[in-house]
Amino acid sequence: MSRPGGRAASAPLLGHEIEPTIFELSVPGRHAFQLRTTQVPARALSEYIPSEHLRTASVALAEVSERDLVGHFTRLSHRQFSVDLGAYPLGSCTMKYNPKFCDAVAADPGLNSVHPGVPASLCQGWLELLVTLEAKLCAVTGMAAATLQPAAGAAGEISGLLLMRAYHRANGDVRRRILIPDSAHGTNPASVTLGGYEVTTIPSNARGLVDLAALKASLGPDVAGIMLTNPNTLGLFEEEIVEIAAAVHEVGGLLYYDGANLNAILGVVRPGDMGFDIVHMNLHKTFATPHGGGGPGAGPVAVSTRLREFLPGPRAACRDDGTYYWSTPEHSIGRVHGWHGNAMVLARALAYIDVHGGDGLERVAQYAVLNANWLRERLRATLPAAYDRVCMHECVLTATGLKNEFGVRGLDVAKGLLEEGFHSPTVYFPLIVDEALMFEPTETESLQTLESLAESIERIAQRAKFDPDGLRHAPQTTPVSRVDEARAARHLMATEDAAGRS
Ligand SMILES: *Cc1c(COP(=O)(O)O)cnc(C)c1O
């Protein structure tokens, strides 16, 4: 089939050419490979499935050769932007380059061909890996024990809240409220509601930090705990964390640390030392699992000694004789995953921690913080920081100036960056910053990359002066140009398959 312009479907795509759907490439009778007919006598399918459930017509699948199939998906894959292609400064998401070494470890058949249901005696190596990873994550966070089961950050949050609930219940305590700062990641209040608690929002002060006086005024015997990210979602370190911890503990509450972006503090400070009782980590952000597009991820939750007996089970544990077994804590909240967690993500994380050895993890944090501060300083005159302070792993800049002067918004800057060959930053988050652009360059980008990112942003700011309209319609040079995001959500269109069924 030919595309607009008459070029053959197998030629590489140019500019804005649209890749046909796999159904448009379909030619009746064409197929990939077929298995030879088998010598084993066929048994009628109806012996297994009642005949009324058996399909009578064939499935409307695309009929394509293997060549067409591979060409189609390879061409589509080249129209993506990925962490392997270039800088992806999407704040709060830690879209850093992940070392291929960790993938190689996870690809080891000795690890990935083991069924999670085999008895412990037949997978001692896997249990050792899990015990070792748990110990290393506890060492990094300053906690006593951890569950590796939660499948992602938000899954870690709900697990952590269930742990909080179990702890209070064991003390005969009914508590209703969880405090959350107004700058928090959206998953935090969502998890609180899902966990059966009410959210009390704590305002930020003029420096972008938790307002300690407001926090103290909100505390009471019905407060189950507080959820905090430190550095917070403005990329700023909560300097009064020790006072905050003392105040929350004084009313019998617990402190939950949202450690999604642990690359900000690895090897430098530990949540356990700051007074936190529960920490979740996003292994798919900080510890070398590529993410985006829906996973898989892993969100282990580490806890202080007093919460250990409530952890989900089973957990891998080691006997005195050095053998490993599954054990479930006495007052466990139960399983939070069908098996033992997303095991290959766990394997990658241990590989990443081990390969960094010595002071390697500390340097991860140092580079992450250095890169974000370099960018913040360099862009001072172009896009000022919302809170002009030294930041941690990310910086929140504001496009208010461009909006007031030229009518160009943060979204337009973000879209313009796509034409420059960079992924966009996070926009309009945290909600408390006007025209927020949240850049997280991550530790894996070089000075040269940061320089060209900054030059691109400066070029866009110039363009805001002489071509604001063009910028409002950017991007135009990418496979998909500016989309109307609101319309996409409001006018859902069901698609049809080749047979015309929707
Ligand atoms: C990414 C993120 C989360 C959620 O993690 P998921 O794995 O996407 O569920 C929670 N909190 C913060 C601060 C994050 O950056």
Image (cartoon, rainbow, N blue to C red):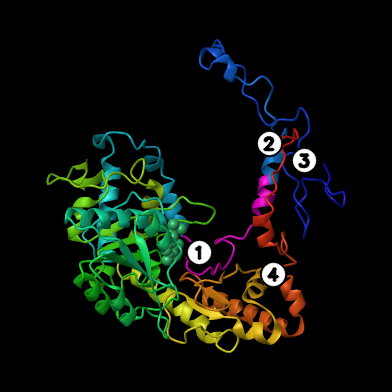
Q: Amino acid at mark 3?
A: Glu
Q: Amino acid at mark 4?
A: Glu
**Of the residues under marks 2 and 1, which one precedes in the sequence?**
2
What residue is shown at x 42% (from left), y 55% (from top)? 102
On screen, residue 2 versus residue 217, left or right, reads right
Residue labelled with disc 2: 66
Residue labelled with disc 4: 419
Residue 119 quadrant: top left
**Span of residues in magenta:** 73-98
Quadrant, the N terminus: top right
What residue is shown at x 60% (from left), y 86% (from top)? 382
Element type at mark 4: helix
Nearer mark to the viewer, of 4 and 2: 4
Residue labelled with disc 3: 24
Element type at mark 3: loop
Asked if the residue at label 3 sits under 8 Å from ligand 1, the reply is no
On screen, residue 248 versus residue 152, left or right, reads left
| C-alpha span from label 2 to label 1 | 33 Å
Are circles 3 and 2 on residues that touch, CB within 8 Å?
no
Residues packed near mark 2 inside 10 Å, few (<14), some (14 to 19) or many (20 plus): few
Nearer mark to the viewer, of 2 and 1: 1
| C-alpha span from label 4 to label 2 | 33 Å
Residue 139 quadrant: bottom left
